[in-house]
Amino acid sequence: MARPQKTIKVKEPIRIRERKLANGNISLYLDIYVKGTRKVESLNLYLVPEIDKDSRARNAITRQQAEKVKSDRILALQSHGIKQWDKVKKSCISLVDFLKKYETESFGFTESTLKGRRDMRKKIEEHLADICRPDFGLAEVDVEFCRGFLDFLQNAKHGVSKEKGKTISNGCAHHHQAVLNGALNKAVREGYIKSNPLKSIPSKEKYQPTESEREYLTMDEVKILINTDCPHAEVKRAFLLSVFTGLRLSDIRTLTWAKILNAPDGVTKLIRTKMQKTQKYINLPLSVEAMSCLNKKDDPNELIYTLPAGTSNIERNIKKWLEAAGIEKHITFHCARHTFATMMLTLGADLFTTSKLMGHTNVQTTAIYAKIVDQKKVETVNLVDSFFGK
């Protein structure tokens, strides 16, 4: 009689191990061993003493979470291998966890920017709840998911309004779309994903900003502000520098003389800085007006401007400044950037050059300002009819 064949047991590359802690809880971690290489990863998951029904149920959920991480790691190992363990862990991060990380990078970013990231993440969480996928992985984000999120935004509930059934505006949806795009670009730069699937969706399927959202100052209004005192002199100089260069507040806050260099002509000065929003370098030639907005510092690494902490404090000073100037517009610091764009196009700069000066990665973004300028030309010509009309 033939002997029964032995069952060959395949050894798992990843096992869940337990470590008892001094407080009586048990810490769960992964023990990874592949081809002679061992890795250990703490899961930050803990079992509690099972003294009742609730504690047993809690531990059951914790074990399920650990098993989910283990499964994700095994799949990632098949793609990257043990030698690229950092990539394995990165590829397994959930979309929500990545977005939470994205919204806590406070260096150089304004309060409004971080709030925009939090708001977008909450909308992502609402969408994931709708499709019953709260643990959706960052690596799973594809064109289909992005389209689904954009569709979700069409009827997404307004988070603040008390009006029943109120949904977010087109402008709000466009902002969430832009923030998600920035987050996915960062995920690509840091090696979490290979490409940004949102870029594969045609512009006609995406939300577009409306001209009404881009308030700006006319050149005459800029002249008035130059000759009007502001409650905070540094805010005035910083705002006017943005008007004459298009720099964002986040970049102006970190501006030093070390970032101001000589242009190739040996006469003109230019700002060379890495933009906080896009993490790309930009070279901005400085006009005489822009140079007049800069405070000279003995230390080239000292910040040029000492601005109030928090965007809201800056906006309050701008509001008082405009009131003193008699300008009845809702102008924020970012409107200085809009003013720069419309001013350049009004003075005859071409769309491509203006786009490069603003650091836009897509010239279509700059084209919005061209539409504004064209509309103002039409309104100006129509003044003739109102003057000579009967």
Image: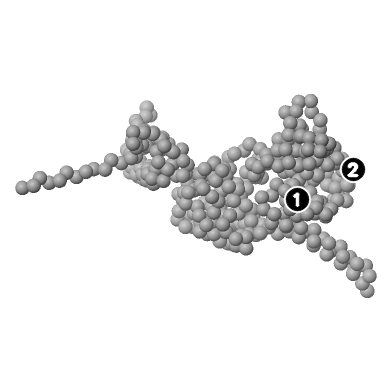
352 or 72: nearer the viewer: 352
Residue type beneath disc 1: Thr
Q: Which residue is mark 2?
A: 227
Give the class, few, some or many, for how many residues have Cα within 10 Å of label 2's Cα (few <14, many ≥20). few
Pinpoint residue 324: horizontal percent, then vertical percent.
Answer: 86, 45
Q: Is residue 249 visible to us here?
A: no
Tag on residue 353? 1
* Residue 378 x, y percent position in the rendering: 83, 64
* The C terminus, quarter of image: bottom right
**In this orientation, which residue lies closer to the viewer: 126 or 257?**
257
Left or right, residue 269 beside residue 274: right
Callout 1: SS:
helix
Q: Quadrant of residue 368?
A: bottom right
Circles 2 and 1, Cβ within 8 Å, touching? The answer is: no
Q: How is the image coloured?
A: one colour
Q: Amino acid at mark 2?
A: Asn
Extreme-front residue of the structure: 265
| 385 with respect to 210 (left or right) | right
Helix, strand, or loop for circle 2? loop
Q: Give the residue drawn at x 16%, y 44%.
A: 6
Residue extending farthest to the left is 1
Judged left or right of residue 152, residue 387 is right
Q: Percent x, y for residue 232?
A: 81, 37
- The image position of residue 70, as x and y in percent, is 37, 43
Give the residue at the far bottom of this rendering.
390
- Image quarter of residue 189: top right
In the picture as drawn, the residue positioned furthest to the top comes out as: 298
Relative height, residue 268 to residue 361 (above, below): above
Which residue shows up at 63% across the image and 36% down it?
107
Q: Is residue 383 above or below residue 36?
A: below
The residue under the point 76% across, 26% down is 299
> Is 86 above or below relative to 337?
above
